[in-house]
Amino acid sequence: MKCEGYTPRSRWAARFLLSILVTLPLQALAVPEIDQPAPALKGTLFSGEALDLAAMRGKVVLVNFYSSYCKYCAYEIGNVETIYEKHKADGLEVVELGVDDVDDRERVERMLRIYHLPGAMVDELRENGFGRRYPTPTAFLIDRNGILRHKHWGAKTADYFREILLPLLREH
């Protein structure tokens, strides 16, 4: 194929636009990196309390992206509630982030209320450096210094909590 009629400048512009179109989706899918400071997370929880991940420094925080329609999320939510109730006094915080459509807000809020877990809708956050879309459930575990220490796709089992989360609670 010949590029007759195209100037070097127009070919450069086309290549430039193509490179932007190729890299934009990659940036949108950027995932926070292990051993780096956790990104910003700010908004209002269903309870009306302010959510600011930076203000939770000194605690171990489980940020869990979930959907009220996800069977694996339904499987793990009781495990999350149990570990949260058992270790909240030890410095564990949990933030459940519903990725459902905003129209399903009541469904998400009702589910979290049943399990006594704090949460919010992803699309209602003021700041969210984690991004929006993950396979659900997806969890990010942040240590007491605000450093992302682990990310996990899939339901969290008792083994996950025993082997990954509990050791972070023991660090001071």
Image (cartoon, rainbow, N blue to C red):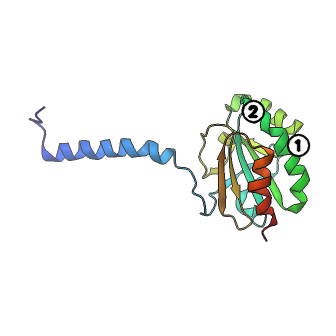
Instruction: Tell me the number on the disc at residue 105.
Output: 2
Q: Look at the image and tell me in which quarter the N terminus lies.
A: top left
Report, in whole angstroms, how far the alpha carbon at label 1 lies from the one at label 2: 16 Å
Residue 39 at x, y percent in the picture = 62, 57
Q: Percent position (x, y) of residue 65?
A: 69, 42
Who comes first in sequence, dot 1 or dot 2? 2
Q: Nearer the viewer, residue 18 or 169?
A: 169
Query: Could you tell me which secondary element the residue under label 2 belongs to?
Result: helix
Mark 1 vs mark 2: give the one in front. 1
User: Foreground residue, 2 or 158?
Assistant: 158
Disc 2: CA contacts within 10 A as few (<14), some (14-19) or many (>=20): some
Instruction: Answer yes or no: is residue 70 visible.
Output: yes
* Rendered residue at 69%/39% (across/down): 137
Mark 1–mark 2 contact, CB under 8 Å? no
Q: Quadrant of residue 135?
A: top right
Residue at image coords 78%, 33%: 74
At which x and y percent is residue 24?
A: 43, 44
Q: Is residue 31 above or below residue 142?
A: above
Is residue 8 toward the left or the right of residue 83 in the image? Answer: left
Which three-letter amino acid code belongs to the residue tagged 1? His
Q: Mark 2 is on which residue type?
A: Arg
Q: Position of residue 162 (x, y in %)?
A: 80, 53
* Kind of element beneath mark 1: loop
Q: Which residue occupies 87% across, 62% down? A: 90
Q: How many numbered discs?
A: 2
**Residue ranking furthest to the bottom:** 172
Mark 1 packing: few (<14 Cα in 10 Å), some, or many (20+)? some
Q: Is residue 117 visible?
A: no
Q: Which label was assigned to residue 116?
A: 1
Left or right placement of residue 15 versus residue 60 in this view: left
- Image quarter in which the C terminus is found: bottom right
**Quarter of the image holding residue 122?**
top right
